[in-house]
Each structure stands twice: as C-alpha cells, then as structure tokens.
Amino acid sequence: VSVLYWRAMSAKRTRDGEGSEAPPPHAERPLQPRPNVEMARVIKGQHVHIRGMVAANGGDVAAAWDAALADKGRLQAYATAMRDLAVQYWDGEHGAGADAASPDPRRPNDRYNDRLGYIVGAVRRYFCGVRAEDRAEGFEPGPPGIAAGPLKEEKRRHFAATGAQLSAEDAAAWSREWLRSRYGGDGSSGGPPRRLVVLDVGACYNPLQPRFDAEGALPLAVGGAAPAPVPVAVLGLDIAPHPEATNMCRCDWSRVAFHDEEGEAVTDTATVPPLVEELRVSPSPVEDPEAVLRRIAPASAHVVSFCLLLSYLPTPQMRAACIVNANRALRPD
C-alpha cells in the first residue's frame, strides 16, 4: 500500500512540477525466492489441473484420468515437488536427517504433525500394543487392537459357558497366548516371527520403509513375556514413483484388480522389489520397469496406508474405489 501511495504522490508531484523523490528503502527490496512455495504451487496446480480436465471432458472421468496418466512430464514434476517438499521441509530440518521425526516448533503440542511417525505409531499400537511412551500421550493400556476382536469372542464364549465375566487377569493371559500363537518367535513356539506387510499407496518416494527400518522390528508386547520382534516390509505404490525411489511399483490403485485364488504367481524374482512374488503382482516389473501393477493377490496385506492420496483424486467415486480396493487387499484376520 505504501509503495502504491508513493507512486501516486510521485506522479502528482511530477505533474505539479515538483519533481520526483527517491522511493522509500523498502520499495526496492526484491522478493526472496521461497522454494517451498513453488513446490506447493506445483502440487496444488496438479490437483486443479486434473479437476479442470474432468470438467473439460464433460464429466468423462475415465478419459480425463487417462489423459492425466499419459502426461508424464506433469506427473514427474509433481513427484519431484512432493519428494523435495517432504524431505526438505517436512521430514527433518530442511533435509537434515530426512524421514526422521522433527516436531514443528510452531506447533510444539501437536504430536500428529509427523505424518510418518503417526503411521508407524498407529501400526505399532494396533499390532504390538501400547508402550509406556504411548500412555504418556493419553493412550490407555490394553491388548493390541488386533487382539480386541478375538478377545471379545472369547469373553462371550466364557460367559456362555460359565455365566461369569472373564477377569482382567484371565483376559490378559488369554491375549498373551493368542498373540504367541499368532506371531511365534518369542520363545514359546520357536517359529520365525510373522512379518507385517504394508502397502503404502501414493508413496511417491517410499519414505515409510526407512522409517520402519529406523524404528527396528516392532516388539510384540505381551505383558511379562519376552517381546517377539515383528519385522515390517513395505511395498510402495504410486502412479508416478520418484525416479530415485526404491522398492516401489507403478500402480493406479483406483483401478487395481485382484487375482482369484488360482491366480498366476510371478516366477522371476531376481530384480523385483520384495513382496512382489508374495503378492502375486502382475505384470512383473522384471519384464518392463515401466509396467503398471494391474493385479494383486487379495487379502495379502496387514496394512494399507493412504497418506495425502484421496485429496489427489478428482471425484468421490474414485476415492471410494480406492477404499474398496484397500478393503479387498487387507487380510481378514
């Protein structure tokens, strides 16, 4: 406002013959470039662009989406902007210690501003129980969330058989036995621990795997028993993975299909990402690195993660399709 006022007054003085004056010092300050703003502009611009394509195609969502997938330049620009924004401004202090937790000093009480930490914590609590650190943040102690359903059934069975409620001590003991039989590897069965399979949809540069690796194998919290280490394996999926990303497949999750029980398995695993054989991914990335993952085994994942995915999709129907496909990919137990 002050600059505009100075210009108006300068023009008036010139017309009145008074000459001109030097502009105030702040009028000459060049705007400092802000890379994060430019990255955000690219990301938001892609969202607007896709929605505009849907409108321009008369509501033909499939045609607009096909055109968006064919525009490799915009997809790679989006992937680069998203990766750079995340690594330089979200995960750590301007890239130092990328993918490590770094609370925003402007929001010191917001424990959920670390999106990766939130996902890792939610997975750990659901499968491995509440730690002391979690209790300090308000989470109530109890069995892992995955044991809640079977424990509820056991309580019903116990009440039907005895007419009495299952005591807290007996419930805890039953949960420990159920977890041991499920996971193994904690000294009770001698078997290898079961790993958790995570599908990170919209992974961009697959930051979840390094974060789980940094956390280490998730400890199975079963009361006084020695915790069993539960490893986590992540397969990242994206319509346009970042060029430097590893352990990822190109995939349009809104259109992914599922093998039937007799689906063909991938046989050549020399260079495919881990889990590709287990999930019966087709076509094989070995044959064509640019191949799109179109089919996957149903009920094959313990976790399906959407982080900033649904807001990218232009219609509620596409978002619903992604959620339905996630439900089909998840294990029933």
Image (cartoon, rainbow, N blue to C red):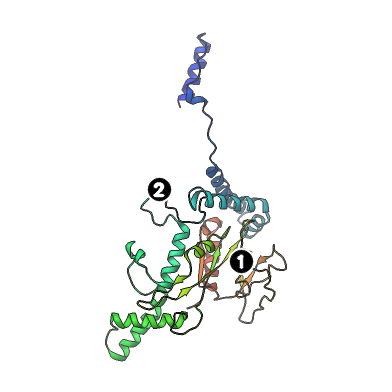
Per the image, the residue denoted by label 2 is 105
Q: Where is residue 316 drawn, in percent x and y? A: 52, 60
Q: Amino acid at mark 2?
A: Pro
* Mark 1 or mark 2: whose residue is earlier in sequence: 2
Q: Nearer the viewer, residue 227 or 44?
A: 227
| Residue displayed at 36% across by 75% down | 143
Q: Residues within 10 Å of mark 2 (few under 14, many from 20)?
A: few
| Element under disc 2 | loop
| Element under disc 1 | helix
Q: Quadrant of residue 291?
A: bottom right
| Residue displayed at 72% across by 68% down | 287
| Residue displayed at 48% across by 17% down | 9
Q: Amino acid at mark 1?
A: Arg
For residue 231, side relative to residue 80 (left or right): left
Q: Give above or below for 156 relative to 287.
A: below
Per the image, the residue denoted by label 1 is 255
For residue 222, side relative to residue 330 (left or right): left
Q: Nearer the viewer, residue 228 or 256?
A: 228
Residue that lies at the very extreme toward the bottom in this rendered image: 161
Total count of labels: 2
State how far apart marks 1 and 2 are (Cα).
40 Å
Q: Where is residue 155 drawn, in percent x and y? A: 33, 83
In the rendered image, which quarter contains the N terminus?
A: top left
